Amino acid sequence: MNRLYGLYGISDCKLTPYVNIFQYLESAISGGLRIFQLRDKIHSDNDIEGLARELQDFCHSKDVLFIINDRYKLALKINADGIHLGRDELDCFQDLRNSFSGIIGISCYASIESAMYYEDLGADYVAFGAFFPSHTKPNATTAPVTLLKEAKVKCKIPICAIGGINVSNVGLLRDADMIAVISSLWSNDNLSLPCESSNFIRYNASSLLLAWKS
């Protein structure tokens, strides 16, 4: 089974507060989540190392991949399943590839050329987007939906779509191998607030998957 496929949930310090993160994550997994990324732009590596280890153990117990966003030193230290690198971390890619046996994903925004370049260097998957206006990243680089079909022809590694994805538009992204979501997974009607009940998260996850492939 290809593990780089399906619903890819990304944490958010506001929408997945750490006091509730295990409960929320379990609900998302029960709704079909297959990949989880810890994304924290606030705390230091030391602050979240213990949490990252616990989350990785929890994900492994549920057969879910655990990815760390940007923090390659932390990913190496805890031997995470994977690391996702954005624009500011790409300078370290080759050294990381030489020392890290896990999954490395790369944000390629709207550039297929960049995706092909990092595929040749050993990336395991590439991410494109934002495909739609994003509440989490309102100033994100935009990418046309048609890019996915071209990328599937030119890239041999799995492709992840990200940015403003919800149940209303996810059906346009059928050429993607993974759909990465934040707000539409962890929140309900108010995208700036977490779900009041973990049942909403389970429903959000299953609804996204159904709308993606139906």
Image: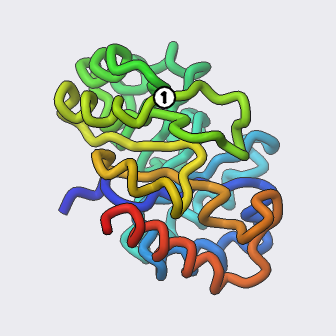
Residue 66 visible (yes or no): no
Q: Residue at x 62, y 55 (%)?
A: 182
The percent position of residue 196, horizontal first and vertical second, equals 79, 80
The answer to whether 195 is drawn above or below residue 34 in the figure is below
Question: Where does the image place residue 1, in percent across and percent down from the top left?
Answer: 18, 63
> Residue 71 in the image: x percent, y percent?
61, 36
Q: Residue at x 39, y 72 (%)?
A: 210
* Relative horizontal placement of residue 113, taking residue 190 as reference (left or right): left
The residue drawn where x is 34% and y is 23% is 115
Q: Nearer the viewer, residue 28 or 42?
A: 28
Q: Nearer the viewer, residue 43 or 128?
A: 128
> What percent of the width, then of the height, locates residue 148?
32, 35
Residue holding disc 1:
143
Q: Is residue 157 left or right of residue 12?
A: left
Q: Is residue 167 above or below residue 201?
A: above
In which quadrant will I find the C terminus? Answer: bottom left
Q: How many marks?
A: 1
Q: Amino acid at mark 1?
A: Ala
Which residue: 58% across, 60% down? 53
**Residue 147 in view, yes or no:** yes
Query: Which residue is more in the foreground, 115 or 122?
Result: 115
